[in-house]
Amino acid sequence: MSAKNAFYAQSGGVTSVINTTACAVIETARAHPQRIGKVLAGRNGIIGALAEDLIDTSWESADDIRRLRHTPGGAFGSCRYKLKSLDEHRAQYERLIQVFRAHDIGYFFYNGGNDSMDTAWKVSQIGEQLGYPVVCVGIPKTVDNDLPITDNCPGFGSVAKYVATSMREAGFDVLSMAKTSTKIFVLEVMGRHAGWITAACGLAAETEGEAPHLLLFPEVPFDERAFIARVEDCVARHGYCCIGVSEGLLDQHGKLMAEAGGSDAFGHSQLGGVGQVIAQLIKDRTGFKYHWALADYLQRSARHIASATDVEQAYAVGKAAVELALAGRNAVMPAILRVSDAPYRWEIGVANLKDVANVEKKMPSEFISTDGFGITDACRAYLKPLIAGEEPPPYRDGLPDYVRLKNVGVEKKLEEFEI
């Protein structure tokens, strides 16, 4: 049997380690030339497949592929685009089969989060329904850490390390100025429905009085009276108050505290600014001077402070994805399984895509303190191994030395397709 080509694409918000996974996919595929021909990457995710806009990664040197391991962003471009069902938009799936057939693609790897796993699941079904054999494997990635079955998601550990470090450093700064100036600092972090990143901020505080003093999770409806009382008490006892808040914080009626307006391609409300809302509320109720910060893209692109654990796991799921595909495992996703907390041990397992697609894993109640404003020891035990270790990128002239690939396009063979 002749070697089939593989399609690989990145989807959704990128991370500081998604290119590590891409590195693993390409290196592992290259180690099996009898089974896999070329790895063709979709330019801007699944859109690249629909538009027949494919990148021939065989033009890239082994050294440049290796450098992907420490390069942030999405090397081939990502997208927020959700495939409709086969019944709703059959033409899209027929187009995918046309492109796969035209470029002899027999393997499909989709690297993303919840909605991306839904896309991967749908694509995994078309081989049988439309008569073209393709092995589809989803590869987990999301800073939100909200995919089910897998213990954690590649991308999260590095974000957790970044926000915990940022909160600790900001805490030192605010404490220095609190006597005569700023007493309140609010850090807004990502997390639409799940408070995993907010929880990670809590790792910065190891003893009573250290920042952060309060955490606001999307799993806990915001209680203004209780919150302001805690802020005032914190300032009275410690002289300052640092707060971590999730972008997806809800009020008592289940409404988002801050919506930027509009929605993305997946139908999610665009969020932003809840940190400023909370900071201004404190100012209005207490008069305390404040500063607030929006971590935004900085938290997910900070490869210079990536977790070594995260980098290792991001590579492991990419390698496992190719091995699963070569074993003929269709409609599956490699999952990280925790064996023990101390010492921290993990292994790679397998999840079915149908059990992962569109399912969100929120913070369990036992990870949130009884007052709703902090994390428990159980949460610390879960989080701490995920931020462990450092694997900094190489530096040149004082700045991280990242790679930019050639991204040579494949010659198109089909007519244009309207997406």
Image: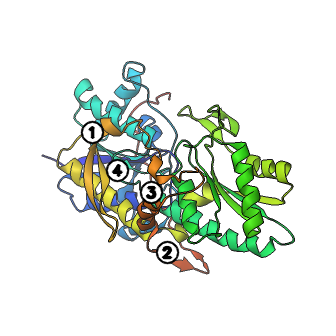
Residue 193 x %, y %: 54, 41
Task: Say which of marks 1 and 4 sits in front.
Answer: 4
Label 4 Cα neighbours within 10 Å, binned few <14 / some 14-19 / many ≥20:
many
Looking at the image, how many numbered discs can be counted on the residues? 4
In whole angstroms, how far apart are the C-alphas of marks 3 and 4?
Answer: 16 Å
In whole angstroms, how far apart are the C-alphas of marks 2 and 4?
Answer: 25 Å
Instruction: Determine whether the residue tagged by mark 4 lies in a helix, strand or loop.
Output: loop
Instruction: Determine whether the residue tagged by mark 1 lies in a helix, strand or loop.
Output: loop
In whole angstroms, how far apart are the C-alphas of marks 1 and 4?
Answer: 15 Å
Which of these two is toward me, 64 or 322?
322
Q: Amino acid at mark 4?
A: Thr
Mark 1 or mark 2, earlier in chain: 1
Q: Which residue is label 3 attached to? A: 18
Task: Say which of marks 2 and 4 sits in front.
Answer: 4
Where is 35 relative to 393, above or below?
Answer: above
Q: Amino acid at mark 1?
A: Ala
> Could you say which disc has been placed on residue 392 in the image?
2
In whole angstroms, how far apart are the C-alphas of marks 3 and 1?
Answer: 20 Å
Which of these two is toward me, 18 or 245?
245
Q: Quadrant of residue 95?
A: top left
Mark 3 or mark 2, earlier in chain: 3
Label 1 Cα neighbours within 10 Å, binned few <14 / some 14-19 / many ≥20:
many
Q: Which residue is label 4 attached to? A: 150
Mark 1 or mark 4, earlier in chain: 4
Residue 116 x %, y %: 42, 40
Mark 3 or mark 1, earlier in chain: 3
> Could you say which disc has been placed on residue 331 in the image?
1
